[in-house]
Amino acid sequence: MNDWKRIWNQRAQDVCAIGGQNQNVFDMFCKLKAADGYDTHIQEGYYEGFYEEWKRMNEKIHKKIPVFESVYEVGCGSGVNLYLYHELMGIDKLGGIDYSLPLISIAGQVFQGKDIDLENGEAACLEIFPQYDIVLSEAAFIYFPDVHYGMEVLARMYEKAKKAVVIKEVFDLAKKEACMKVRRGSVENYDEKYKNLDKTFYAKEMFLKFAEDRGCECMIVEPELTFYWNNDYVFDAYLYK
């Protein structure tokens, strides 16, 4: 049995099981996801769905990269993804950067006493070294000021990664009109409440072209978050070196 499968079976057979350490891990996961802003449109199975999506992400990574020992996240927020890597997969070499000082402070508390590289700063200022096996970003690209900024961040992430880059929850340019229609229908006075907080949408072809130019493999994947209101309008990009 591969090492990662053995670790997974030992530590995460059922993170949502009632009672025991796994329940404690899941409870913390829920709190950290809420701190990151995933606390709207909550219904039964909502946070369980996000955990299952995290699991599917790692299954995809492991199919291409059977072993990885370090993870860095751009836009790490409260550190929720890094927390799962530490608790469920036993990965100790972790790091992340986030623009929000309150969120990076929460991450610091989560990993208090542990040697985790956490930084408060702009994604565009991401340092290339030290490198990590996997460089990840979830739901951060939507908040970048424009597409050019986002692709510059992707280039830096690619240089920082030894094995793969994973970008989750990228808003699909082809679905922008439908997405904004749903958002305006779901939130009263949406344009007023979100004034100067425009979302950035990307074409899938941009990620495919980025990979082609660098001679790496790019997989575009549709997420499976049934209860998440953005699910139908986003895609994930996996770039393997």
Image (cartoon, grey):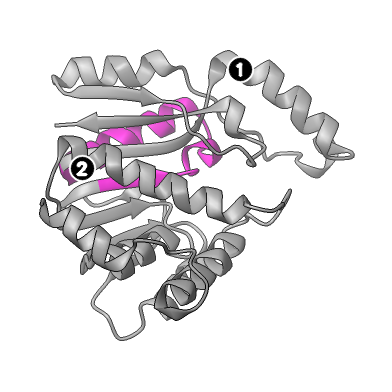
Q: Which mark is residue 175?
A: 1
The quadrant holding residue 114 is bottom left
Q: What amino acid is found at the position of numbered circle 1 in the picture?
A: Lys
> Circle 1 sits in a helix, a strand or a loop, which is it?
helix
Q: Nearer the viewer, residue 28 or 167?
A: 28
Residue at screen point 14% across, 32% down:
241
Calculate the distance from the C-alpha at mark 2 to the C-alpha at mark 1: 30 Å
The numbered dot on residue 207 is none
Quarter assignment of residue 196: top right
Q: Nearer the viewer, mark 2 or mark 1?
A: 2
Q: Classify 42 as above or below 181.
A: below
Residue interval drawn in magenta: 135-162
Q: Which residue is label 2 attached to?
A: 62
- Residue at the bottom extreme, as displayed: 113
| Residue 126 can be seen in this image | yes
Q: Secondary structure at mark 2?
A: helix
Side (left or right) of 21 relative to 172: left
x and y, in percent, of residue 117 in the image: 27, 68
Find out whether residue 148 is within the magenta segment: yes
Return the residue nearer the eye: 165 or 200. Answer: 165
- Please provide percent x and percent y for residue 194: 75, 41
Q: How many marks?
A: 2
Q: Residue at x 37, y 49 (%)?
A: 55
**Residue 198 percent location from the top left of the image:** 66, 34
Three-letter residue code for mark 2: His
* Dot 2 and dot 1 residues touching (CB under 8 Å): no
The quarter holding residue 129 reads bottom left
Verify whether residue 58 appears in magenta. no
